[in-house]
Image (spheres, helix red, strand yellow):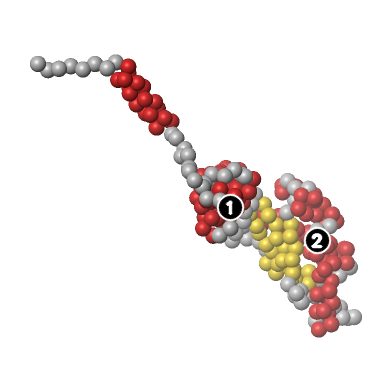
Amino acid sequence: MELKEYMQILRKRIWIIVAFVAVACIGAGVKNYFFTVPVYEASSKMIVNQAYNAQGVPNLDYASIQTNIKVINSYMEIIKSSAILDKVAATYPDLGLTGKELGDRLRVTTANESQVMNLTAIGVSPEKAAKTVNAVSKIFKSQIPVIMKVDNITILSEANPNENTKPVNYNPMMNVLISLIVGLLLAIGFVFLLEYLDDTLKTEDEIEKELGIPALAVISKLKKEDARSSKQTTISQQQVGDNQYATVNQ
């Protein structure tokens, strides 16, 4: 099948493509504007950077830095454990979240070979997101000496609710564009599926291609208006034939 034939198939059912794209775009717009709950993010940073020598004097060298980097993987697990999150829920009841719900809204990341941990939380408002991530940071810092028997966590920066005032899940134009592309692809696939399932012959070219013989005659499709007009003409001719009268002007 050549490119020209593909284009003919698409033009023949262009209304299906338009309908698919329109439904996809309208559906995406309605969902974004009426059914999407805005979600906001807030982040804080913590660093694992303290080490002490035998006399209790702060000491920092390459070995201690490497140790801190390795222990961060354990800290990333501890910070999302029930030992921390349940205490956050109990200490800050105004958050209205359980330990499990806090874990679902929390994300902990770190760059390779870095002592810094990035803690991110989501909420239904910038204030709620910032308060959640700051609460987890403070409780984690206070509980690490109890859990690990070492005080090596420093909060570098707390979340500010005034920094991230735009929701992270609300981008109507992008969502509509994605829906347009998806709807277009689905429509094209559906059109070609219909064409594949349709085994009827509609044109003389298809007949000649299928049977390998030329078409001698073609019966065109007659519209209702044309049929009605033809019927009226036939009746009129019959009436004239049945009543043969002639007048002479004297």
Identify residue type, mark 1: Gly
Disc 1 target residue:
212
| Residue 129 as seen in the image, left or right of residue 89 | left
Q: Is residue 217 visible?
A: yes
Name the image quarter holding residue 113.
bottom right
* Inter-mark Cα distance, 2 to 1: 75 Å
Q: Is residue 198 above or below residue 239?
A: below
Residue 39 in the image: x percent, y percent?
64, 52
Name the one closer to the observer, 216 or 176. Answer: 216
Name the one closer to the observer, 202 or 131. Answer: 202
Identified at 67% across, 62% down, the residue is 43
Callout 1: 10 Å neighbours few (<14), some, many (20+)? few
Identified at 34% across, 26% down, the residue is 233
Identified at 84% across, 74% down, the residue is 70
Identified at 70% across, 60% down, the residue is 120
| Residue farthest to the bottom, as pictured | 62
Residue 235 in the image: x percent, y percent?
36, 22
Q: Is residue 191 above or below residue 49?
A: above
Q: Is residue 195 above or below residue 225?
A: below
| Residue 37 as seen in the image, left or right of residue 101 | left
Q: Is residue 151 visible?
A: no
Q: Nearer the viewer, mark 2 or mark 1?
A: 1
Name the one closer to the observer, 46 or 176. Answer: 176
| Residue farthest to the left, as pictured | 250
Disc 2 target residue:
79
Q: How many discs appear? A: 2
Residue 41 in the image: x percent, y percent?
65, 57
Callout 2: 10 Å neighbours few (<14), some, many (20+)? many
Of marks 2 and 1, which one's residue comes earlier in the chain?
2
Which label number is shown at residue 246? none
Report helix, strand or loop for mark 1. loop
Identify residue type, mark 2: Ile
